[in-house]
Image (spheres, rainbow, N blue to C red):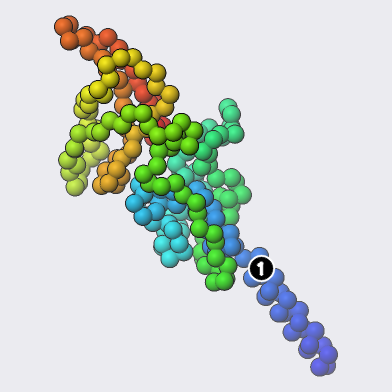
Amino acid sequence: MPHFLVIAITVALSGVVQAQSDEITYNTHVANIINENCVVCHREGGIGPMLLENYDQVRPWAPLIQLKVANREMPPYAYDHGIGIQDLKGDWRLSQDDIDTVVAWVNNGSPMGPADVLPPEPVLPSLEAWNFEPELGEPDLIIASIPIDIPAGGNDLWHKHYVDTGLTQKRCIKAMQVKPRGDARAVVHHSNPSIEVLNKDTGDYEDFSQLTEYAMGKW
C-alpha cells in the first residue's frame, strides 16, 4: 500500500510539471512575437495608441490583440497572402504559428509565465532614424512642413499645402520618406506627397509626379 501511494504521487507531480511546460505564456512564447512585430510602433514616442513594451502593458489589451491578430488586422500589412511574391523585405506579417500562439495564450487567460524567463529586449531603430539610411545614407534634402493646427476632436482632417523644395534643377529621386516628428507622431495617419511644377506665366503644370501610393504605410 505505501509503495502504491509513492507511485501515484510521483505520477501526479509529473503531470503537473508536464502541463506547466506545455503552457503558452507571455515570457516564454508571446513576448518575442510582440517585440519583433509590434513594439516598433507601440513604444514610448511611437505612433501606436498604446504601449506594448512589457507584460503589464500588454495584459489589459490581450483580448483586443487576439482579435486584431486573428483577423490579420495587426500588424497593419495589407498584402495579399495568396498571390504574388511572398518573400518581402520588412515584412511584419505574422506567421500562422505566431497567430495561433497569441490566440491560444489569450484563450488560456494570458498568463505571464515564469518570472525568471525574461524575453530579450527588442532591437529597435531610433525614432529619429530614416528608413533608407542604412542603404542610401542620410537624406540629401530635408524639406520641413509648415505648422498645422489639429482640432482636439472631429473627423479625419485632410490638409493640402505647398512647400518650396528649393531645387533649381532636375534631380533623380531614389527614395523619400515622410517623417512626423514630435507631437505630429500622435496625429499623422499617412501622407501622400507629390511634386508639382507650375509655369509662372501660364499657371499650367509643367510636371506633376505622385511620390507615394494611396495606401497606409506606403512611404
The residue pinned by badge 1 equals 21
Q: Quadrant of residue 167?
A: top left
Residue 206: image location, x then y, percent: 27, 9
- Residue 108 visible in image: no
> Relative to residue 99, is residue 58 depicted above or below?
below
**Residue drawn at 60 percent across, 46 percent down:** 96
Q: State which quarter of the image contains the N terminus.
A: bottom right
Direction from residue 142 to residue 131 in the image, left or right:
right
Closest to the observer: 42 or 77?
Answer: 42
**Residue drawn at 29 percent across, 43 percent down:** 181
> Relative to residue 192, is residue 1 depicted above or below?
below
Residue 205: image location, x then y, percent: 25, 11
Q: Quadrant of residue 218?
A: top left
Which element type, helix, strand or loop, lies under badge 1?
A: helix
Residue 194: image location, x then y, percent: 31, 22
Q: Amino acid at mark 1?
A: Ser
Residue 161: image location, x then y, percent: 21, 27
Classify mark 1: residues with Cα within 10 Å, few (<14), some (14-19) or many (20+).
few
